[in-house]
Amino acid sequence: MLTVASLSRAELGERMARDGIVLQTGAFLVHLHSAIPVVADGIALMYRDYPLHPADAFAHFHLKLYRPASLRRWYRPQVHMLFDGEALFQPLPLAHAFPMLEWGLNWCVANRAHRYLMIHAAVLERGGRAVILPAPPGSGKSTLCAALAYRGWRLLSDELTLIRPEDGWIVPVPRPVSLKNASIDVMRSYLSRDTDQAVFTTPVDTTLKGWVAHLRAPGDAVARGSVCVPPAWIVFPRYQAGAPSTLEALQQAPTHMDMAKNAFNYSLLGARGFDMLADVVGNVRSYRYTYSALDDAMAVFDQLAAQP
C-alpha cells in the first residue's frame, strides 16, 4: 500500500493542497486538506510510515487547515481548522499548525468514536498484552509512554485508550507522542543513549500548554496498527522528583472509579459503559506507580511483562 514516504515532499504538498490526502491512523481514516507548508512538513516527518488511501476514499473525519484571506495572512499570521466544514477551534498562530492538527485529531476521536469506551490514557503492548496508563496532565504519563515505546513496548496510543465492546480488547490508534516543556529535552537525552530512530518535531511555544513537541511513533507500532490486544494491567503513573520507584497494588473498586474519572464517554454509554469498565478492571492487575528515574521505571515494567 502507498505510504506517506512513497511521495516526495513536493508530491505530498501538492496532493494535500489540491484534493487532500486520506491518512490511516490505526482504526481511523482522516481526510486532510491543507496548503500550509508547515502542515505538510509535519506529516512528512511524523507520518512517513502511515498508509495513504485514494483521496476519494471513505474517511471517518474530514479536516481542513487553512490561512485566512485577510490581513492576518501577513500580520501575525494565523491558522484555522475546519471539521466537516465547521470551525473546530479558535484560530491559532501559524507556527502552531501541526500541534493544532494533532489536537484536532484527538478531538475527533474523543467526540465521535462512541462505539468504544474511551479512556484518557496512554496504552502500550508487550507479549500480546496491553498496559493502560491513565493519568492527569503533569503526571509524567507521556514521558513514560515515550520511553516504553522505544524500550520494547508497542505504542497503541499516547492519549486515547479505546476499548471495544464485543470483547474488551484495546483498539490501536498509534500516532506521534505529545511531549511538553521539560519532557522534551528529557526524552531527547534519554532516547539518544542507544537509538538513532527517535525523531522529534521542532518545539513550539503554545503559551497555554507551554512548549510542545511530538515524537514519531516507532515503525512497528504503525505497521501493526490493526492488531488489537487484551488489557492485562492498569497502572496509574505519577512522576515525583527524587521519589523512589514504588509500585502499589490497587483494589478493583477504587480502580473502577479512577478509570471512570478518566473516561471521555463513560456516562454517555450508561449501563453498557459501567459493565465494559467493570469487565476490564475485573480481569487485569491494577497498580499505582510513583517514579523519578526512567531506568527504574523500565525495570518495573519489564517485571510486569514477565508476569504470567
Image (tube, rainbow, N blue to C red):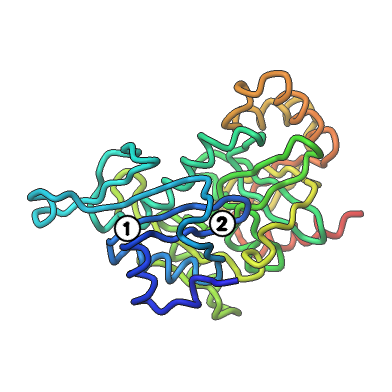
* For discs 1 and 2, the disc positioned in front in the rendered view: 1
Label 1 – label 2 distance at C-alpha: 18 Å
Q: Depth check: 177 or 74 in front? A: 74
Q: Is residue 148 left or right of residue 140?
A: right
Position in image of residue 45 (x %, y %)? 44, 71
- Camera sees residue 144: no
Mark 1, Cα crowd under 10 Å, few <14 / some 14-19 / many 20+, is many
Q: Which residue appears at 65% of the width and 34% of the height?
A: 115
Seen in the picture, residue 252 relative to 148 is either above or below; the reply is above
Residue type, numbered disc 2 = Thr
Q: Secondary structure at mark 2?
A: strand
Give the quadrant of the N terminus. Answer: bottom right
Chain-order first, disc 1 or disc 2: 2
Seen in the picture, residue 6 relative to 281 is either above or below; the reply is below
The numbered dot on residue 34 is 1
Q: Which residue appears at 81% of the width and 58% of the height?
A: 128
Position in image of residue 119 (x %, y %)? 62, 37
Q: Which residue appears at 72% of the width and 39% of the height?
A: 164
**Count the marks: how many?**
2
Give the quadrant of the C terminus. Answer: bottom right
- Camera sees residue 306: yes
Q: Is residue 147 left or right of residue 189?
A: right
Q: Is residue 154 left or right of residue 7?
A: right
Quadrant of the rendered structure where residue 279 is? Answer: top right
The numbered dot on residue 170 is none
Q: Which residue appears at 28% of the width and 47% of the height?
A: 207
Residue type, numbered disc 1 = Ser
Mark 2 lies on residue: 25
Position in image of residue 278 (x %, y %)? 78, 28
